[in-house]
Amino acid sequence: MKKGKYTKTQDPTGWGDSTKLIRGGLTRSEFGETAEALYLTSGYVYDDPESAERRFSGEEEGYVYGRYGNPTVTMLEERFRMLEGAEAAYAVASGMAACWGSLACQLKSGDHIVASKSLFGSNYQILTVILPRFGITATLVDGNDLSAWKAAIRPETKILFFETPSNPLLEVLDIEAISDIAHKAGAQVVIDNVFATPLLQKPMELGADIVFYSNTKHTDGQGRVFGGMILSTAKFKEELLKPFLRHTGPTLSPFNAWVLLKGLETMKLRVNASSHSAEYLANSLDGMPSIERVYYPHHDTHPQVRLAKKQMKLGGTMVSFDVKGGKEGAFNLLRRLRIIDISNNLGDSKSLITHPATTTHKNIGPEARALMGISDGCLRLSVGLEDASDLLADLKQAMAVNS
Ligand SMILES: *Cc1c(COP(=O)(O)O)cnc(C)c1O
């Protein structure tokens, strides 16, 4: 779309995150609508056959097919790209499409990955079950042991992969140090930044090469749509991501892109508010009689609290804790909750709580759970936008019988 008329030329240099979230990537049609337009179309038409020919050859700029691009999706990509401070962004249908795309587009049989063992369940499945079927293997290491990363690297290692904070125990890994190790070995760093969001942590500034998100979480933040995003260099997007994703089909729906654009407008307000409530809850839960241990990146008892404060603006919207009495203790607490919903989703305006050992981390089995340190009494709380005092009261009344 031509700049001018209703679309301003954008120079985000010096813009803060809030301005990028509201204005980034905004283009307007000839009608001058205030809000982002939803272009719900799968295809495009051409004035004449020569124009179609030119578009397909790349001589003429423009869209050719919904699987290749859409103006609403482009707005979302551009907004996200500015927020992350990346050269390029590619929107896909879900967080897992983003994980799969960022790995599969560049790997081939014989390649090797080193990954932190604290992984989201589906990331774990891709690395340990799906990729090995294509001859691509992964070595899992204790992410905080830098010598373990170094020792696991082989000549065929192409990628170092991790989440920080991790799911569900909110382990915090040193992005700068691990990126340094990767680059010395000629490998790339791929980071799942879902828990931190691009507002609290900017991995590329610390050396990460590829960052991906589930936009299903904090970007929508209101439990409605799926989406994913991959941030990379322009070269990586053009040479590897585009050819892979265009033809394998994890296309983001323009409708979802439009919902996510509106989600981004309020994301900073939501993430900041939830993070403040999460910190308050972590502080309040610590030391309560039925709580064995609290996990929160900016909490004093967190083993990497100094790193977390250096790397993340706030401690994030997630709090995990071990309840006394194992699975039974955890289930008793869940059953009695009156406000907080039992749900494995996260990053929502509604507070949601899950028991990882029987839900998100059930499939990986008891051995892998033990390796990751996920106990049967562990609960993972995604803090929403309700009054923090009401959330604390809900947890307290649910614990009353346990203690
Ligand atoms: C939810 C989630 C994903 C996957 O995202 P979907 O949108 O559900 O596909 C990946 N990583 C983390 C850390 C997540 O929480």
Image: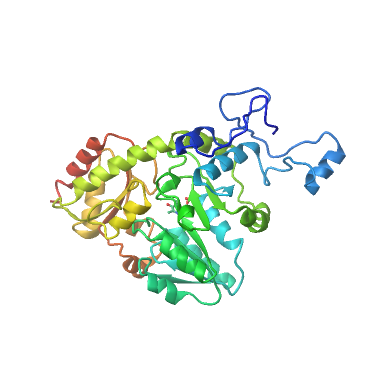
Instruction: Using the rendered view, name the quadrant where residue 69 is placed.
Output: top right
Residue 92 drawn above or below residue 102: above
Quadrant location of the N terminus?
top right
Is residue 128 shown to the viewer in this render? no
* Residue drawn at x 49%, y 54% as measured from the top left: 204
Instruction: Using the rendered view, name the quadrant where residue 349 is placed.
Output: top left
* Residue drawn at x 66%, y 27% as measured from the top left: 29
User: Is 38 left, or right, of 349 in this rendering?
Assistant: right
Is residue 318 shown to the viewer in this render? yes
* Residue drawn at x 61%, y 47% as measured from the top left: 251
Task: Return the x and y of residue 127 as percentages of the image width and height.
Answer: 49, 66
Instruction: Using the rendered view, name the quadrant where residue 40 is placed.
Output: top right
Task: Return the x and y of residue 315 as percentages of the image width and height.
Answer: 32, 48
The answer to which of 271 and 331 lies nearer the viewer is 271
The answer to which of 182 and 336 lies nearer the viewer is 182
User: Is 166 left, or right, of 278 in this rendering?
Assistant: right
The answer to which of 36 and 250 lies nearer the viewer is 36
Task: Return the x and y of residue 304 as percentages of the image width and height.
Answer: 30, 59
* Residue drawn at x 36%, y 70% as measured from the top left: 145
